[in-house]
Image (cartoon, rainbow, N blue to C red):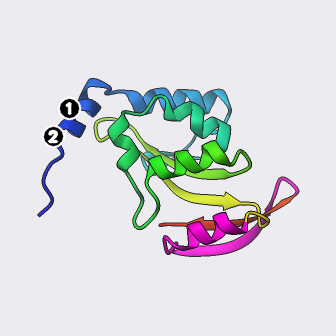
Amino acid sequence: MKLLDVPCVLEKWRKRGYTEKIVERLRHYGLAEYAYGRYWSVIPSPILLEVSELLPRCAYKERQNNSPTVGEFIDIARRHGNLYFVTMVKPQPNELFVIEGLYIPPEEKDLVEWAKSYEPDVIGETQAKGETFIYCWWD
């Protein structure tokens, strides 16, 4: 049985409404799409770093299935400005911000191997914005 992380619950309660602020920021860039009670976006590294400032610190521990944690993705975004992240934002009352996928330029071979080490549910290659990307999804 998983015990409740009381400090995290309290931190999220004190910062309640953080997901609305994130959605507002994503809308500013035209990147928030609403479906199934959640907001979905594909955002570049600089925007991930920008919205990460709105997160409670304990939200950095969140993950989608076997994916890296939000904090690990943020660290990667700091070092690689050429990535795209698939985000899901669930608004109040059960606020949640997770990263479900990652688009990596194929020349970033070490990063592709790092992502594969987390056993994504789907791995493939795609074209977007005139560039080729390797995508990894944890769904």
Element carrying mark 1:
helix
Give 6 or 90, whichever is nearer the viewer: 6
Q: Amino acid at mark 2?
A: Val
Pick the front one: 78 or 139: 78
Residue at image position (36%, 36%) is 57
Q: Residues within 10 Å of mark 2 (few under 14, many from 20)?
A: few
| In magenta segment, residue 110 | yes
Q: Position of residue 22 (x, y in %)?
A: 50, 31
Q: Residues within 10 Å of mark 1 (few under 14, many from 20)?
A: few
Quadrant housing residue 109? bottom right
Observer-nearest of 44 and 34? 44
Q: Quadrant of the N terminus?
A: bottom left
Residue position for label 1:
10
In the drawing, does residue 83 fall left or right of residue 34?
right
**Residue 42 image position (x, y, % from top left):** 63, 48
Instruction: Identify residue type, mark 1.
Output: Leu
139 over 15 or under it: above or below: below
Whether residue 42 is visible, yes or no, is no
Q: Residue at x 67, y 59 (%)?
A: 103
Q: Which residues are magenta?
A: 109-130
Which residue is depicted at the point 47% across and 26% down? 21
Pinpoint residue 85: horizontal percent, then vertical percent: 61, 51
Residue 80 percent location from the top left of the image? 68, 49
Q: Looking at the image, do the residues carrying marks 1 and 2 touch, with CB atoms under 8 Å apart?
A: yes
Mark 1 vs mark 2, CA separation in Å:
6 Å
- What residue is disc 2 on? 6
Q: Secondary structure at mark 2?
A: helix
Q: Vertically, is 17 above or below 73?
A: above
Tell me if residue 30 can be seen: yes
Q: Is residue 124 magenta?
A: yes
